[in-house]
């Protein structure tokens, strides 16, 4: 997290230091996602396009070391499937966990 300190002058004699909350601190930094529980999880696009707001993770592929190598999500309204980097789901500016 980033914390900026701002000096606020309360009178001519004293200066008070107060933390200034940056935009990053005002939002939830990132979702914590367990890759094993990714399949069939529900997501809401933070900025929907083409009326596609709600999505379901329909496919997750793992390698021999149990690392996610591929992930696909499906738009509920249009049934359109697209590949996605599962790390993008951690970004709360793009995705919200669950259907909102």
Image (cartoon, grey):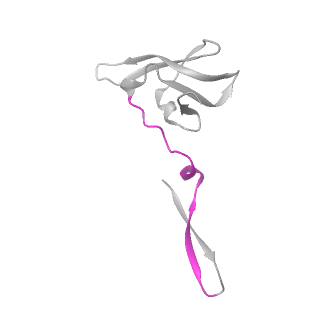
* Quadrant hosting residue 36: top left
Q: Quadrant of residue 33?
A: top left
Residue at the farthest right position: 50
- Residue 65 vs residue 90, the one in the foreground: 90
Q: Which residue is found at the position 70% from the left and 21% from the top?
A: 51
- In-image side of 57 versus 68 (left or right): right
Q: For the point 69% across and 25% down, which residue is it?
A: 49
Residue occupying the far bottom of the picture = 13
Q: Is residue 16 above or below residue 41?
A: below
* Residue 56 picture location, percent across and down: 52, 19
Residue sticking out furthest to the front? 100
Residue 39 percent location from the top left of the image: 43, 20
Q: How many marks?
A: 0
Residue that extends furthest to the left in the rendered view of this protein: 65
Residue 21 is covered by the magenta coloring = yes
Residue 98: x and y in percent read: 53, 29
Please report the bounds of the magenta region as a residue range.
13-34
Residue 75, quarter of the rendered image: top right
Task: Locate the C terminus by quadrant.
Answer: top right
Does the magenta run of residues contain 12? Answer: no
Q: Is residue 97 left or right of residue 79?
A: left
Q: Is residue 58 above or below residue 9?
A: above
User: Residue 68: x, y in percent?
Assistant: 39, 23
């Amino acid at each position: 997290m980033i914390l900026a300190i701002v000096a606020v002058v309360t009178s001519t004699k004293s200066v008070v230091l107060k933390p200034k909350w940056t935009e990053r601190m005002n939002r939830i930094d990132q979702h914590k996602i367990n890759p094993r529980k990714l399949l069939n999880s529900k997501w809401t696009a933070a900025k929907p396009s083409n009326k596609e707001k709600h999505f379901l993770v329909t496919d997750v592929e793992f390698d021999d070391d149990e690392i996610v190598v591929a992930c696909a999500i499906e738009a509920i309204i249009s049934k359109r499937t697209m590949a996605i980097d599962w790390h993008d789901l951690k970004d709360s500016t793009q995705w919200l966990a669950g259907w909102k």
